[in-house]
Image: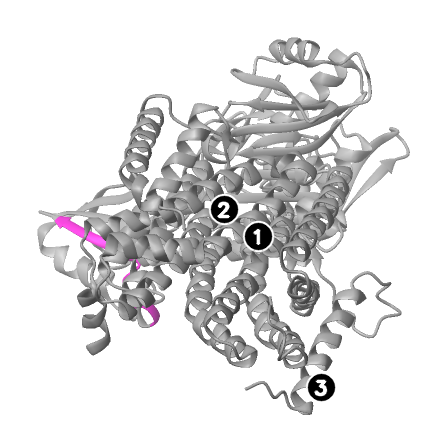
Amino acid sequence: MLYFSKLRITLVSLVSLFFIFIAVSNFQNSKDSFISKKINLGLDLQGGSYLLLEIDNGPVEIQKLQNTTTVVRNFLKDKKIIFNDLRIENKKIIFNVSNDNVQLVETFFLDKEGDINPYYNQYKSHQFDVEIQNNEFSLTLSKYGLIEIKTSSQDQALEIVRRRVDEVGTNEPNILKRGNNRILVELPGLDDPMRIKSLLGKTANLTFRFVTQNSNDTFGTEMLKFEDGTSEAMVSKRIILNGENLLDAQPQMNNQTNETVVSFTLDRVGAKRFGKATSTGIGKQLAIVLDGKIVSAPIIRDTIASGNGQISGNFTFQSATDLALLLRSGALPAPLNIIEERTVGPDLGQDSINAGVIALMIGFLLVIIFMFFKYKIFGLIANITLLINLFFLVGILTLFEATLTLPGIAGIILTVGMAVDANVLIFERIKEECKKEKNNIIAFDTGYVKSKTAIIDANITTLIAAIILFFMGSGPVKGFSVTLAVGIFTTLFSVYFIARMLTGLYVERNKEKTKLI
Amino acid sequence: MINFNKFYKLFNLISLSLVVASVLLLFFKGLNFGVDFKGGTLIELRSTDKNINVTSLRQSFNKMNLGDFNVKKFGNENDFLIKIEKKDTSANVIDVIKKDLTTFLGGSFNFRRVESVGPKVSSELLKSGIIAIALSLTAMLFYIWIRFEWQFSLGAILALFHDVIITLGLFSLFSLEINLSIVAAVLTIVGYSMNDTVVIYDRVRENLRKFSDIKIYELTNISINETLSRTIITSATTLLALVSIYLFGGEILKGFSLAMIMGVVFGTYSSIYIANPILVKLRVSQKTILKEDTE
């Protein structure tokens, strides 16, 4: 058993050298080094912002129900069915039809091919759950109907969030879906997320609507506040233009009034509509409404057919820039709420790295001194193994471009403390065997064999804890579970391949020694 | 050889009273949950102005009407930790605080860390933390059950419960903060304590096979002694690493490493004084093991 083939020795040495090389390449300039892979630093180490946004789908659901009401109304009118009391109540569409029509209306909602069930073939589910009591229909969005709304608004919101974050121009942002109604935004290097937060907090739903004095407007009217919150105006619900018609928006200085404005360019459809509205509405006030508040309501003096216009308001250059950015990137399908925020400044990140590195060095030193005094030569072997183990650990984290967090560094230090365990188990066993067995080589072999089950079991239990932590933990804590888990594998590898070889070579040279360990 | 088994009864009594005390503490005093689990806002602030201190900060925050808050020093002379209980984080509270602080104290400070957790997220985090710990205990129970016999599995799990409950009890007693990293620490304690127990159990099983005439009471004692130096050395190196994190790893890792230190101490103790007496109580004998082998 004590024979180690040349091939094996060479292979183990090559693997070790490879990982040492990779681990060291982390500390070199990436341009010079052979491997461009590096360990990523987590937000807690490099500084940055973590934002968890939740999409408020309530308004989208209401919108969906409103649209459906129109569909239902058209259908009923089409079939000349008399209906009563069509209304939305508690997220339900409710209406009455006469008894002899119940059957017909029900088939409409259950029609798998009909427009009302756009994804029946995909999910085997209707869009609405229909409940019929006597002759009253009550429609609620089905489970899949809700999921469909959530996923589609999440997809849209993700796109808009990405555009807005990209426009601000932060360094390598990370924007991901979480669940079916959340979006995670990680912004490395950003120590003050104030601007991004305010940009993401706005739906940016822009509409152009006439101000009216006539509350009997056919489309309905509503009272809206001005942005400054002091005055109000009655605005028609008829939308002349909305944000989707915008091709571009830029902040600009108006030379005549010396005011900052947002100038915009409309697409062809938008330009046409805007031209028509401005020609028929000369003298009227056109309200520019953003997220339910009037930004400004200028009086139309001329027909604007070019499709270019300006929004004025009491803008500073910054707020005009932000508004232009919001308009360019488009409206969010639903409001977003920031439900979790974690921001670490770059200096704290650096402090954490420094503290982590110092703790690692001191921990490592204490452990190797302890091991050397306890086991002498064998301690030296354990220490060499431990050092190579560290290179393995860092090397593997580099190869996988894993994210290192502060708890992750703690995981590495802990690995240093616990990694010697396997070697200790083996050494203690060899020591015991030496008491019974005169032949050092046999004692060495039985030591390895007999300690195996304990080592495997002990490491698997730690691995189980690390795996659970990986799946249940979040952010920095996840980094801890990664280093802990990788540390277990590198420990086992280094103990069984490197330490075993070194111990074997030593034992072979000291076959006759009476007190081996 | 040290006669550990002589003190089984005494230490079981001590452990039992510690567990009961911890449960009572957890029940009546409760845990000091941090922002992660309770929701609210945490700000780590560094001042460049020597005149800014806890009192002046407290006065400034008082003027802001933010509800319950807590200001304390954090490590360094000029570092402060402010916790605001206000659950509503929808508004840009942090920006308001920043502006207000500048007005009250001048701009001589910087926000090194801000954590703001909404009530929904915090309750989810708490839930997933509890699930994670429960899941890991269950996973260990089954793993040991598969590898050993149910008697061993029961002993190991009781030892784990003992470690986790007493560690949490101490956190409650000293009102130490429970945050996400403490959950990570508790899970690692579970792994470590198990690791320690498994090594001794492995030896108990080996000895059970070897000696049919030695009673389990003696046998556990032999096994503990045989593995004792390993137990001590591994605990020592692990503690060296942890103490180094505690002393040099910075303020953020203090709670984490402290929990781990407690866990390692209790984990080592419980593998000797909880896990083994239970094998004795359950009258484990060679039969228990042989049944496993013939199956």
Which chain contains the residue that carries disc 2?
B
**Residue type highlighted by circle 1:** Phe
Residue A126 or residue A254, whichever sits in front? A126
Distance in Å between CA atoms under marks 3 and 1: 33 Å
Label 2 environment density (alpha carbons within 10 Å; few <14, some 14–19, many ≥20): many
| Residue B63 drawn in magenta | no
Distance in Å between CA atoms under marks 2 and 3: 39 Å
Q: Give the range drawn in magenta.
A: A122-132
Whole-percent x, y for residue A121 in the image: 32, 72
Disc on the earlier residue, 3 or 1: 3
Label 1 environment density (alpha carbons within 10 Å; few <14, some 14–19, many ≥20): many
Residue at image x 32%, y 36%? Answer: B11
Task: Say if mark 2 contacts mark 1, CB within 8 Å.
Answer: yes
Residue at image x 78%, y 70%? Answer: A36
Distance in Å between CA atoms under marks 2 and 1: 8 Å
Q: Give the numbered dot on residue A480.
A: 1
Q: Is residue A207 visible?
A: no
Label 3 environment density (alpha carbons within 10 Å; few <14, some 14–19, many ≥20): few
Could you tell me which secondary element the residue under label 1 belongs to?
helix
Q: In which quarter of the image is residue A457?
A: bottom left
The residue carrying mark 3 is A10
**Residue type highlighted by circle 3:** Thr
